[in-house]
């Protein structure tokens, strides 16, 4: 599918006069369309709920948009729980899906009344010791082991993943939890990431529904919900076909009617914890070409770097790039597009065919709306970019300012070095 920016060069030129590049920008219209389509696709299930995976894009302004559609939030840490609390969420609007969980995180999740999803059987005792009880509604994360395949394609390797409980463990966990007073059970699994196939959710659903059936019988417990978690991907590459959420929803419905309904389990609620699918395509990193270098290869240096978007450096991930204003031009050049870190993997693209780039051109890096800004860090003393929202009426709102030196030095604020930078005025200099 052709990859089209949701902004024109003229728009970016105007925006950059107020908010200099680099910045991440999100498209409100697209976000609303995706959440509506997801809810529609699963409207056959009465209790359906999307718990947006906060880690993908932890920005309260964007989370607020999802709240309008009654989304809950899937949190995995103390600070993510804080974000949810700041947005006024409590109780079963929060799913706490964590692993290797610190006690203080469990205590806080419990205080908010979140649904707790246990990653391991040993966490039953750990949780009980921490909060003094076992909640009535509780969930366990399942890991069937082995390879996860769709027909003959290997999608991922759950047997090699640190998450979840084996079939024997989840059975034992349910028995123990029941004895300790749990009444409503949930089952959760995340078996493959960024799947660009309509088959992933239905295949996962079959595994989970059959497991739910087995556990309901064997342990004689009430399965309240099945959480299909994240993993629905997006077409980062132009040659990939996007997932069709309607087809996915129908696929899950079919398995639900085959497996759960005949077993008298037609009241089981379906939950999702999508991150990438919800916001990925609706964000972009906009950056300016500032240097061209020709040595053994041709490099375009831009004003963003891996600090703003780590996926290419970390996973060799592909992010499509459009040179704004040159979308229709023929790609006659081969470039490496680089950031300024002292790390040779700080490249947004390697040997990429692009139109000829001039200094000052805006490069639009696609699909940074999830796991983009959020993964950033401060290596090399680089400061993270701003986040902007392109609102439905075409206006632009700043939803997180760019970092300033004082943010970088914030954890030295009790040191004499910090004092000195304040005294010399250096701290305020860079705005
Ligand atoms: C990361 C994560 C998600 C979201 O994954 P996506 O690939 O963004 O859909 C959902 N649930 C859990 C537990 C996760 O860790």
Image (tube, grey):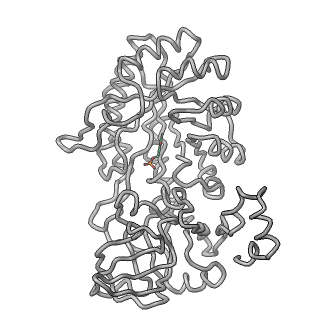
| Vertical placement of residue 410 versus 90, above or below | below
Q: Which image quadrant is residue 260 in?
A: top left
Q: Nearer the viewer, residue 240 or 405?
A: 405
Residue 400 is situated, as x and y percent measured from the top left of the image, at: 66, 64
Residue drawn at point x = 55 percent, y = 82 percent: 11
Can the viewer see residue 328? yes
| Vertical placement of residue 179 versus 136, above or below | above
Q: Which image quadrant is residue 334 in?
A: bottom left
Q: Is residue 183 left or right of residue 264?
A: right
Q: Residue furthest right?
A: 423
| Vertical placement of residue 303 versus 237, above or below | below
Residue drawn at point x = 24 percent, y = 39 percent: 149
Q: Residue furthest top?
A: 179
Residue 371 is situated, as x and y percent measured from the top left of the image, at: 48, 56
Q: Nearer the viewer, residue 330 or 105?
A: 105
Q: Residue furthest left?
A: 152
Q: Nearer the viewer, residue 280 or 303?
A: 303
Residue 178 is situated, as x and y percent measured from the top left of the image, at: 52, 12
Residue 297 is situated, as x and y percent measured from the top left of the image, at: 29, 82
Q: Nearer the viewer, residue 83 or 186?
A: 83
Q: Residue furthest front?
A: 416
Q: Quadrant of the N terminus?
A: bottom left
Q: Quadrant of the C terminus?
A: bottom right
Q: Which image quadrant is residue 216 in?
A: top left
């Amino acid at each position: 599918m052709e990859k089209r920016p949701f902004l024109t060069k003229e728009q970016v030129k105007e925006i950059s006069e107020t908010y200099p590049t680099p910045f991440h920008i999100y498209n409100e219209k697209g976000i609303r369309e995706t959440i509506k389509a997801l809810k529609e696709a699963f409207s056959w299930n009465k209790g359906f709920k999307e718990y947006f995976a906060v880690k993908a894009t932890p920005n309260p302004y964007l989370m607020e948009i999802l709240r309008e559609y009654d989304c809950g939030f899937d949190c995995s840490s103390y600070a993510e729980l804080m974000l949810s609390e700041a947005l006024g969420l409590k109780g079963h609007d929060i799913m706490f899906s964590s692993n290797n969980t610190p006690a203080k995180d469990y205590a806080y999740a419990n205080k908010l009344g979140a649904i707790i999803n246990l990653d391991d059987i040993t966490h039953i005792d750990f949780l009980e010791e921490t909060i003094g009880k076992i909640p009535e509604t509780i969930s366990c994360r399942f890991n069937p082991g082995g390879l996860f395949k769709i027909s003959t394609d290997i999608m991922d390797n759950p047997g090699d993943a640190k998450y979840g409980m084996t079939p024997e463990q989840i059975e034992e966990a349910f028995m123990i939890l029941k004895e300790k007073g749990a009444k409503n059970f949930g089952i959760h699994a995340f078996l493959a990431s960024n799947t660009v196939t309509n088959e992933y959710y239905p295949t996962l659903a079959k595994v989970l529904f059959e497991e739910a059936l087995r556990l309901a019988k064997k342990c004689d417990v009430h399965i309240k919900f099945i959480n299909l978690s994240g993993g629905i991907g997006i077409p980062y590459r132009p040659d990939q076909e996007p997932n069709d959420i309607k087809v996915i929803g129908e696929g899950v419905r079919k398995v639900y009617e085959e497996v759960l309904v005949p077993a008298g389990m037609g009241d089981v609620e379906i939950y999702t914890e999508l991150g990438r699918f919800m916001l990925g395509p609706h964000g972009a990193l906009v950056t300016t070409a500032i240097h061209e270098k020709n040595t053994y290869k041709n490099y375009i240096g831009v004003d963003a770097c891996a600090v703003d978007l780590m996926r290419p450096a970390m996973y060799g991930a592909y992010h499509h790039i459009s040179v704004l204003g040159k979308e229709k031009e023929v790609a006659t050049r081969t470039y490496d597009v680089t950031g300024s870190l002292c790390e040779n993997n700080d490249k947004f693209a390697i040997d990429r065919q692009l139109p000829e780039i001039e200094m000052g051109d805006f490069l639009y890096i696609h699909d940074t709306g999830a796991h983009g800004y959020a993964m950033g860090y401060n290596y090399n003393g680089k400061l993270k970019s701003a986040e902007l929202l392109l609102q439905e009426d075409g206006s632009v709102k700043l939803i997180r300012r760019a970092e300033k030196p004082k943010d970088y030095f914030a954890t030295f604020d009790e040191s004499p070095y910090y004092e000195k930078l304040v005294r010399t005025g250096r701290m305020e200099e860079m705005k």
